[in-house]
Amino acid sequence: MDTFLENSLFRNIYCNLASASENCAARGYGDALLPDGLQWLAFTLTGVAIIGLVVNAILMGVLGFIWFERRVFARFQNRVGPNRWGPFGLLTPVADAIKTMFKEDVAPEDSDRFLYNLAPVLMVVPLLVVFAVIPFGIGTFVADLNVGILFILAVTTMSGLAIVMAAWASGNRLSIFSGLRAVALLISYEIPMALSILGVLMISGSLALGRIVESQNVPFILVQPMGFLVFFLASLAEMNRTPFDLTEAESELAAGYLNDYSSMKFGLFFLAEFMAALAGAAVITTLFLSGWRGWEPVPSQVWFFLKMGGVLFVIIWIRFTWPRLRIDQMLAFAWKGLFELTLVNLTLAAILIAVWPQPTTTQLWMMAAINWPVFFASIWIIGKVMGVRPHQIDRTAMGALYPVATDEPAPASEASEQ
Amino acid sequence: MTLKTEPITINIGPQHPSTHGVFRMRVTFDGETVVDLEPIFGYLHRGSEKLAEERTYTQVVTLTDRMDYVASMTNNQGYILAVEKLTGIEPSPRGVWLRMIAAELQRIASHLVAVGFLIQDLGAWGTPLIYAMREREKILDLFEMLCGARITNSYLRPGGVFMDAPDEFWPALDILLADLPQRIDELDQLLTNNEIIVARTINVAVVEPEAMVNASITGPMLRAGGVDWDLRHRDPYDYYDQVEFERPLHTASDNNARYWVRLQEMRESIKIVKQCIERIEPGPVRPPEVPFLVRPPAGDGYAAVEAPKGELGFYLVSDGGIAPYRCHVRAPSLINLTLLREMLVGGMVADMFVSFGSIDINMGEVDR
């Protein structure tokens, strides 16, 4: 019970419901709503309340993020963006949701109904669960698992399975392409993603997200630039966002696995897409941007959401400015680029941890100073090996050819023999 | 060990976000590779050529608008040139300069659409497309000043144009011409050296110049293969022999070359418009003696212009009546599509739509 009560969210609800607990009394809580002997009920009610609170908070967060994305997107394109419903158009996502709910729910005749209905649920639930282990502030978390990061890695893998299920159950050939791509991406990007976190885990010495945040006297983006880059790109691929949105690939597969979904089933996929971005940003903030840590008197929760907003902005920025990679280029990028980068990062982190087993703040800064030159050198080498640099395209030949065609016009009689 | 894979056939279109209209392809894939392809079109067939036989010569202008609706002015131009050749009407100089300005502006607008949608096909969520469309809007505003319509202009008449440009047109055109080169440079900077665009377009869908000549492909697609064939230069119509311009050529003949040639042609078009403004003089926009109901003598006439998509030809047969006896259109979009199979087979799914978009077809013109 003591460990539960460290969670301020749980404590505030539970101790106001059940009074007789001496643990609550020790923390200065007085009279309560429920009579003595009903602590089991208080415990259950608290759990339900927290679940309801967190799920609703995430859904509201998704609505806010949809609005934010559309407004930022519009700015990139010299437009104003949604500004009709509510102040600054804040209610536009609500209107969208209502519209989606009232659409007719059509399923293709050839579809495998069970899998077809299960896939959207399987897409959303793991993403909701991710938020359970993320510390949003001091004492603000649902569960502080001691294997939190492993839990996140395990749970997010489900989204690939959900896409394959949706693609297969739709019985649509364009969807099957999308499913095949989802599997290829899952296999390729899960490995660099997991490996890129190892550096962070070595330095912080823990798998618990709370402990990782506490050990970030220097944000790990400075100490682990390679790990950050790989994790960021791999999570972009995991959440199927541009330039890795191959499973959806609007200009190729129409909408990929979403082709045959309508109404709220489509709405759930849509929700999951944005929720994945939120979850990814939250994990990146926790692992690399020192989570809720900031300066007083601004509350720790505000710091967390500010950093998360920054990451989300970068995600939106990338999405609306970069074209999509081809599937072979994407797999090559994962196996020839990111994988090597993680190996370099891992080796370096292992050596540095062997030198400084319990790094102090100064030692973290020294690690950063060693990491950055190696980061730039590795990026340069990988770019040399993999990239199609413009100098390989013969620009000079283009320039030379350009004014060549200045001979006299051909006689009109000759040219008009069509 | 070799894995045996089963090819699957997919029907793409006529309703698909990337087929640029109601185009349909029956494609056989082996994994992500295209092994066979059969283009099917005709979904937008409106019988324009037959309809032309029921209209007077002036009324047919409105039908030509609706063929390549991204480049109405050049369609008008091709048709009007054929009518003038058939009847022997001598156009008035101001009308000719005006229609050259309109045609070159239309070429810029059409190429902007082609470049913008090429990037859209690469999956860039519309940002470069909207940059290109923003510039096209300004050109359409100018068309609205010229003739009151933005897309289906019907601006040209036998002997010139139907209306002189209003006074406010010329300062607006000057502002546009001062602004447009910077906007094209902006597109150039944003797109040409972009790592992903380069990786996606270089050496993709290469077509041999010989094959293109044999298939009588014209326009930027041919010039991207290094063949110097531009009707404005080879067989000058209107006053194109009196203006200076260069023809951008490229040898690579891949998607990137086609994109690059279009970008450079926009710059050349701006040069031509500037020269037209210098040369234009006051006068009637069409000869007063040309009747509104043109009645050419019996005979036939063919005229071709360099439309943004390629060589656009109109073949008219007259039996001496007020309507053409027969009207045939040599549509560049349709003829440029003939190498589609050779371009796409052996490529990847993702490249398929980019290569298809790089031909720059318009279904209104393919099906007519």
Image (tube, coloured by chain):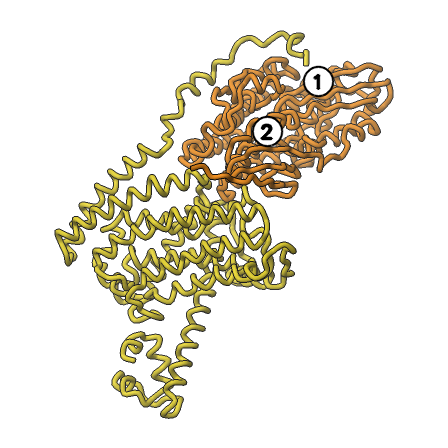
Q: In this image, A244 relative to B71: left or right?
A: left
Q: Are marks 2 and 1 on the same chain?
A: yes
Tell me if residue A254 comes above or below residue B140 in the rendering.
below
Identify the residue at image location x=32%, y=35%: A383
Tell me if residue B45 comes above or below residue A343 in the rendering.
above
* Quadrant including the C terminus of chain A: top right
Q: Chain of mark 2?
A: B
Residue at the farthest front position = B1
Residue at the farthest left position = A355
Badge 1 is on which residue?
Answer: B303
Out of B35 and A356, give the one closest to the viewer: B35
Identify the residue at image location x=62%, y=31%: B361
Identify the residue at image location x=32%, y=66%: A135
Tell me if residue A275 comes above or below residue B1 in the rendering.
below
Q: Label 1 amino acid? A: Ala
Out of B368 and A405, give the one closest to the viewer: B368
Identify the residue at image location x=53%, y=9%: A407
Q: Label 2 amino acid? A: Arg
Alpha carbon distance from label 2 to label 1:
30 Å
* Quadrant including the N terminus of chain A: bottom left
Which chain wears yellow? A
Within-10-Å neighbours for mark 1: few <14, some 14–19, many 20+: many
Which chain wears orange? B
Badge 2 is on which residue?
Answer: B341
